[in-house]
Each structure stands twice: as C-alpha cells, then as structure tokens.
Image (tube, rainbow, N blue to C red):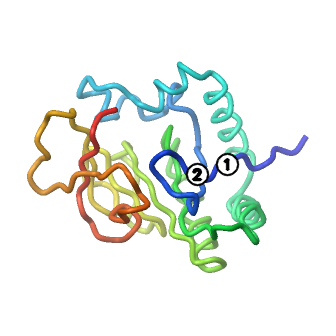
Amino acid sequence: MSLKLLCKFGTDKTGDDTLLLNMGSAMRCVARDRCQVLLDGRKCYPAQVERLHPVVKAFRDRQQAYWEAHDAERIARDILDKIEGRDPATRFFRFNESGDFASQDCVDKLSAIARMLKQAAGIVTYGFTARDDLDFSRAEFLVKGSGHDAGNNGRSVVIGAGEPVPEGYARCPEDCRTCDLCMRPTGVNIAFIER
C-alpha cells in the first residue's frame, strides 16, 4: 500500500497560502531532550493538542510514515500536485509545527524538497528546530534555532504572557498573515508567547 501525502493548509496563525507537513508528532518528538520549551519548564503546545485530540497525533504519525517512506523527489512532486490550481496559491511550506528533524538525512531531504518547490512554484520553505547538533549551513530552507544559533535564520524563544520580550528579539504577533519575519532571510530573533 502506497502512503499518501497528508498535509493541511493554514492554522489559526498561518494563512491559507501555507502548506504544513510534519516529520513526526510532538509526543514522539526526537528532540525532546534538546527542546528549550521543555527545558525551561514550559508546556509544549503541539503536545497539548495531541493529548486533547488523539486524532491529531494519529494524523501526524501518518505524516511521519509518509515522510520516512518517500524520497525528496516524490514528496516535492506530491506537494506540487496537491497545490496545482489551488486558490489561494501556496506561497509557503511550513515544516514541523510538531516534531523535529530525526537526523541530518532529514535536513538534506528537506533541503532538496525546498529547492524543488522554490524552482517550480516560488514556494518559501521555513520552520524551527531544537536540534543544535545538525548542520543547516547549506540548507535551502529557512530555519530558526529554538533557543540556539545553529539554524540559518536567527533564533526563537518562548516567553510567558507577562514576561518582557528579551533584548534583541521581536515579539511574534501570532498572525503570520500580517508578519513574514520567519519566512524571509532576515535573521531576526523571535519571541513567542506561551499558549
């Protein structure tokens, strides 16, 4: 049985012009021991959603199975087929709203996918990672390091609702339809408010 591309368009934060695909679920995240959110004693929002709605975790587990079963060319082709003729046009590919890169091979695979999507449809690929042990220096996608500078587009932190935004950071407006700092190679550090 061939696994199908399972993705979604938009969330309560991102616009409908953004396709989202996860390499895994938050509850099975390979970067739990590196995650600044968990290390700071904060709650992982994607894991909370998966606990409240088991169907979400099951969906993300199926996304992981798809990701692991297919090479970059197949995934890029499936994405391009999925977005063809779609209104609104897909402008962004957001990877890993939950989970993280399992290995350097995943970084390299996503880089190849990002290159194909950019060349074929002008799509910008972006996201975040807790993995400070992987090499993003040649990645063809934008990635902010979660609590570290190992990405290629600045860093991100999570702060409490009443906490001040750290110096050198911009506060996330929580609406990607009005802000594109994470989707451009700005290197701007972003502070997210804990949900």
* Residue furthest out toward the right: 1
Residue 91 higher or lower than 1, as above or below = below
Image point 36% across, 61% down: which residue? 182
Residue 178 higher or lower than 155, as above or below = below
Image point 46% across, 24% down: which residue? 48
Amino acid type, mark 2 = Leu
Q: Which residue is mark 2?
A: 20
Where disc 2 sits, the SS reads strand
Badge 1 or badge 2: first in the primary sequence: 1
Q: Quadrant of the N terminus?
A: top right
Amino acid type, mark 1 = Cys
Residue 92 higher or lower than 3, as above or below = below
**Residue 52 placement (x, y as % from top left):** 54, 19
**Front-most of 11 and 169?**
11
**Residue 78 placement (x, y as % from top left):** 76, 60
Where disc 1 sits, the SS reads loop
Residue 53 location, quadrant: top right
Distance from the alpha carbon under mark 1 to that under mark 2: 6 Å
Image point 71% across, 57% down: which residue? 71
Q: Quadrant of the C terminus?
A: top left
**Front-most of 59 and 16?**
16
CA neighbours of label 2 inside 10 A, class few (<14), some (14 to 19), many (20+): many
| Residue 159 placement, left or right of 153 | left
Q: Which residue is mark 1?
A: 7
Numbered circles on residues, count: 2
Residue 116 location, quadrant: bottom right
**Residue 160 placement (x, y as % from top left):** 21, 33
User: Pointer 1 and pointer 2: residues touching (CB < 8 Å)?
Assistant: yes
Residue 110 higher or lower than 11, as above or below = below
